[in-house]
Image (tube, rainbow, N blue to C red):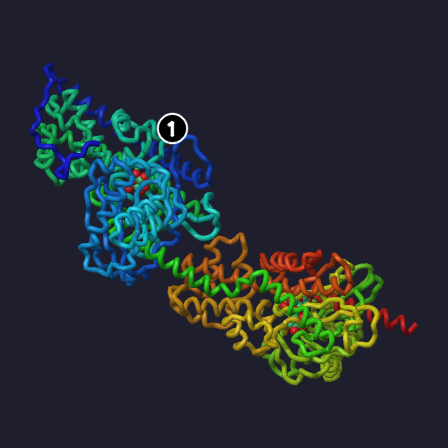
């Protein structure tokens, strides 16, 4: 298009050209005018059709389905969060493409204090026409030149400058600072830029220029700058609308709805690029002959058809085409035209805005027309005003239909009945054209009645918002570095895991030989898994996990279980031993009464999930309490005697305690009843531990050399001799120090459910203190011990959760947080639970390799019976354990069987086996 200088109009030195023949009569004229203006009328039904068709195109593009006609593009921008209000720093912003033929450079200072703004300093440079249509390198050199000219005049520290690049053309972004131009729009057509990364082109030009060392941190579309510049208000500002030379909108979409992103968490800002919308079915009926002419004569015929009905670059041109047509028909200006009226680009947006403004008065319209070399009559002035109004009204209505489509899309994606949202508006058409805005807003209300929208004009163009994105990009990069540094010690590599496995093997061997070792390797006196011939009714107790249970187990050809859960209050678990065992007996009595078993003395198996040195099946000396238990006067005593003493105190019952069984052993027995290859028991719940069938010849301290015995490893204490110090982080140390058994159960404290949440909490506290999380604000809630239960970790890490739900879980815990925070919390949880699963896997690998070596086989197939809330409820724990075992013990095929009935069943089976053997010896 012709450039016509800053005054906009050629002075009327050119001659008028007038018709030689007669003009139409008054009735013909009014018909001609009506016919012409009628073309610009759009019905509500047509707007609704455009809205629906645009919405369809948007959703299709989000799903990544190619559409036959060029439709909207839905380009992800890599802006993942709206501003915090805490962004701060000085930023250089370069704006190219938003306002036609000018380029703007800004110096933006963000104070980080809400409501406290420092006016940006800015300078505008007119881009010469030959640069807009010349070689790409020339354009970017021009930009770099403007940058240094601007910076030269700034009284600021020019070291380490960070620049945000506002580049308002359709681009494929592949990162916050990588963006490939798809095609020029508006009045630009520089060669060699389409298909190139515009950030790189700018960096190269800055380097060529050589005057400044500037880091281009982020590239954004003007719509994104507009949205991000919006002051955080009562409702989130999640849509940015620009109507300037061109038009477009962006909005915050759920990342999982954007097929091209391999990301299912969080949100991302999507630039709709609705300017290219061109559905024939929907747009066809509203296109006028003037639209066709305009398109034909434009730089990019056939492209940006929708934009050409709305964008400021085109509104003046449409008005010009209509006025020229009406003049040529003899309806306007006495049928006279002027060379200016017949020249492309002679009427600009500001002229249209001025002429349309009712308060401007006839004199202003007159003056504009005269500047065009025309001699308007009084009636011409009114008609010209009508034409301007018709063109602008249609533009505002079409823009409203498009915005309504975006709001519907947002509403669908949020799955909300009603949507409350703020739309940031920017661009000269919005800013300087109050009628445009009011029609736009009224029409949006009509077309999207379910959306409660407030419109917030952007205060200082998109510049502030671009600086925000740049600040966010710089902050995110810094935060990510800190997060990565913090989590690095949790990310164990193959060598570290192999070392854990090797250390475990060493500690096992020492423990078995009776030498000092953090692994006690306790003989359990269980010598065989069940063979199916066991029969009878048994009582079982199950103490030490999340629940205390009393069970009645009927073993016939199968196993039938009736059980009841009783609570053990913390005051009892940490009170006196006598109180604890009295409570247990009370629960048994209650159970017997309820089951009609009073007076019967059934054989009883006692699952007691703490380290005990067993002297026989029915004798176990508690070595030390673990997990949340700490009842006095029990350590060093035989647990069966403690139970028997409580029974005696209670007098009313008679019980026949036959076996005391660790939960790992109970689990192995219970799974062994189904699968004879099950020779390992594993618990990953409140605590963690494993047992396995060892060759008796390897077990010091138990007479006999043939056969096998189940060994309770008590691996929770692995590392208590300091051998895990290399892996222990500051967070592990904090958790250990705050526990009731500092220095003890160090392996357990890195793995089991009772501690993982606490590790996460300590990491979150640390990240908050670094300002990486929760905007650096420590909350009382986060200081509260044990607010993170294992079940939260399992819930948060579930694949099916959107980040919104992760946030809801954390908000339920009383932690107010942003999506960025939620994502980081999730990553912390993942790092902690992954390390736990891998350490557990390294332990299992050590055990299976030991069994393989015992048997002297090349390949071992073995099953592990597993129980525990963390293992069972966590979405990835079990597969990570299995993967680690495969990696560290490649010659073992290990099957994991989840125990369904708890270890109480196993305790009953141990009891049953013992009774069967006792009967045999009696016989
Ligand atoms: C089993 C047992 C409990 C055991 C528990 C571990 O099913 O019956 O005695 O301690 O699992 O799981 P938890 O997550 O409850 O600690
Ligand atoms: C461009 C968009 C831009 C809009 C408003 C369009 O021509 O394609 O990227 O946002 O103009 O400036
Ligand atoms: C105990 C073990 C038990 C494990 C799982 C540990 O704290 O010391 O005996 O098997 O927890 O419940």
Q: In terms of depth relative to the viewer, which is nearer, 288 or 131?
A: 131
Left or right of 872? Residue 797 is left
Q: Quadrant location of ligand 2?
A: top left
Q: In terms of depth relative to the viewer, which is nearer, 454 or 298?
A: 298
Residue 137 lies, with reference to residue 638, above or below; the image says: above
> Which picture quadrant has residue 569?
bottom right
Residue 52 lies, with reference to residue 631, above or below; the image says: above
Q: Position of residue 433 (x, y in %)?
A: 20, 42
CB of mark 1 near ligand 2 (< 8 Å): no
Q: In terms of depth relative to the viewer, which is nearer, 44 or 628?
A: 628
Q: In terms of depth relative to the viewer, which is nearer, 29 or 263?
A: 263
Specify whether residue 443 is in view: no
Q: Position of residue 193 (x, y in %)?
A: 33, 39
Which residue is located at x 37 percent, y 38 percent? 195
Quarter of the image where the N terminus is located: top left
Name the residue carrying label 1. Answer: 281
């Amino acid at each position: 298009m012709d450039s016509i200088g800053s005054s906009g109009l050629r002075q009327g030195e050119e001659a008028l050209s007038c018709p030689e023949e007669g003009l139409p009569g008054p009735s013909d004229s009014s018909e001609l005018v009506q016919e012409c203006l009628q073309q610009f009328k759009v019905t509500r039904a047509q707007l609704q059709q455009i809205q629906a068709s645009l919405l369809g195109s948007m959703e299709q593009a989000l799903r990544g389905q190619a559409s036959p006609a060029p439709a909207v593009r839905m380009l992800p921008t890599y802006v993942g969060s709206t501003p915090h209000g805490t962004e701060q720093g000085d930023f250089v912003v370069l704006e190219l493409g938003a306002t036609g033929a000018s380029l703007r450079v800004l110096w933006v200072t963000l104070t980080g204090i809400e409501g406290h703004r420092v006016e940006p300093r800015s300078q505008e440079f007119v881009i010469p026409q030959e640069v807009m249509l010349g070689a790409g390198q020339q354009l970017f050199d021009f930009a770099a030149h403007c940058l240094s000219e601007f910076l030269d005049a700034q009284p600021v520290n020019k070291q380490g400058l960070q620049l945000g690049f506002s580049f308002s053309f359709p681009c494929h972004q592949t990162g916050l600072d990588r963006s490939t131009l798809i095609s020029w729009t508006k009045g630009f057509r520089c060669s060699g830029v389409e298909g190139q990364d515009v950030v790189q082109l700018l960096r190269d030009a800055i380097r060529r220029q050589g005057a400044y060392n500037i880091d281009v941190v982020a590239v954004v579309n003007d719509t994104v700058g507009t949205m991000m510049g919006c002051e955080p208000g009562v409702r989130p500002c999640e849509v940015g609308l620009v109507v300037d030379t061109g038009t477009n909108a962006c909005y915050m979409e759920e990342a999982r709805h954007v097929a091209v992103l391999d990301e299912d968490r969080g949100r991302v800002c999507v630039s709709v690029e609705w300017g290219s919308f061109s559905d024939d079915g929907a747009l066809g009926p509203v296109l006028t002959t003037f639209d066709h002419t305009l398109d034909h004569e434009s730089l990019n015929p056939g492209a940006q058809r929708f934009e050409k009905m709305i964008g400021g670059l085109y509104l003046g041109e449409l008005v010009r085409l209509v006025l020229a047509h009406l003049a040529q028909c003899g309806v306007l200006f006495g049928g006279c035209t002027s060379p200016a009226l017949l020249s492309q680009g002679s009427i600009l947006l500001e002229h249209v805005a001025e002429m349309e403004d009712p308060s401007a008065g006839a004199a202003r319209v007159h003056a504009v027309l005269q500047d065009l070399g025309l001699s308007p009559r009084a009636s011409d002035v009114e008609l010209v005003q009508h034409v301007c109004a018709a063109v602008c009204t249609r533009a505002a209505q079409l823009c409203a239909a498009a915005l309504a489509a975006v709001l519907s899309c947002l509403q669908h994606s949020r799955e909300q009945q009603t949507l409350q949202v703020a739309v940031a508006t920017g661009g000269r058409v919005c800013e300087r054209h109050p009628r445009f805005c009011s029609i736009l807003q009224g029409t949006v209300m009509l077309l999207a009645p379910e959306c409660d929208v407030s419109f917030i004009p952007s205060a200082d163009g998109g510049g502030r918002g671009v600086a925000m994105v740049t600040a966010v990009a710089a902050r995110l990069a810094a935060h990510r570095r800190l997060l990565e540094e913090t989590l690095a010690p949790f990310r164990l590599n193959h060598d570290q895991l192999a070392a854990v496995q090797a250390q475990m093997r060493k500690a096992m061997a020492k423990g078995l030989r009776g030498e000092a070792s953090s692994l006690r390797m306790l003989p359990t006196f269980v010598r065989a898994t069940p063979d199916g011939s066991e029969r009878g009714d048994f009582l079982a107790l199950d103490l030490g996990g999340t629940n205390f249970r009393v069970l009645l187990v009927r073993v016939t050809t199968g196993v039938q279980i009736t059980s009841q859960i009783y609570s053990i209050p913390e005051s009892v678990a940490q009170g006196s031993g006598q109180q604890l065992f009295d409570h247990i007996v009370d629960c048994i009595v209650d159970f017997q009464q309820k089951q009609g078993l009073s007076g019967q003395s059934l054989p009883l198996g006692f699952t007691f999930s703490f380290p005990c040195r067993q002297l026989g099946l029915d004798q176990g000396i508690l070595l030390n309490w673990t997990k949340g238990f700490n009842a006095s006067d029990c350590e060093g005593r035989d647990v069966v005697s403690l139970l028997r003493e409580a029974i005696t105190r209670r007098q009313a019952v008679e019980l026949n305690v036959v076996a005391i069984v660790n939960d790992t052993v109970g689990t192995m027995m219970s799974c062994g009843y189904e699968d004879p290859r099950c020779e390992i028991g594993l618990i990953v719940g409140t605590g963690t531990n494993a047992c396995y069938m060892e060759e008796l010849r390897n077990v010091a301290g138990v007479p006999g050399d043939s056969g096998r015995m189940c060994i309770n490893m008590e691996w929770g204490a692995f590392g208590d001799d300091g051998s895990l110090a290399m892996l222990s982080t500051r967070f592990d140390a904090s958790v250990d120090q705050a526990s009731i058994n500092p220095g003890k159960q160090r392996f357990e404290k890195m793995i089991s459910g009772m501690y993982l949440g606490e590790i996460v909490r300590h990491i979150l506290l640390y990240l908050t203190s670094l300002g990486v999380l929760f905007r650096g604000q420590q909350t009382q809630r986060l200081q509260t011990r044990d607010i993170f239960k294992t079940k939260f970790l399992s819930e948060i890490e579930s694949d099916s959760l959107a980040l919104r739900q992760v946030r809801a879980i954390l908000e339920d815990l009383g932690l107010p947080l942003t999506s960025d925070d939620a994502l980081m919390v999730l990553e912390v949880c993942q790092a902690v639970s992954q390390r736990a699963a891998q350490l557990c896997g390294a332990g299992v690998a050590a055990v299976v390799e030991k069994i393989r070596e015992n048997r002297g086989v090349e390949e071992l197939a073995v099953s592990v019976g597993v129980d525990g809330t963390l293992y069972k409820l966590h979405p990835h724990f079990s597969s990570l354990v299995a993967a680690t075992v495969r990696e560290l013990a490649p010659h073992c095929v290990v099957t994991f069987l989840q125990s369904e009935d708890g270890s109480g069943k196993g305790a009953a089976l141990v009891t049953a086996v013992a009774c069967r053997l006792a009967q045999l010896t009696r016989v």
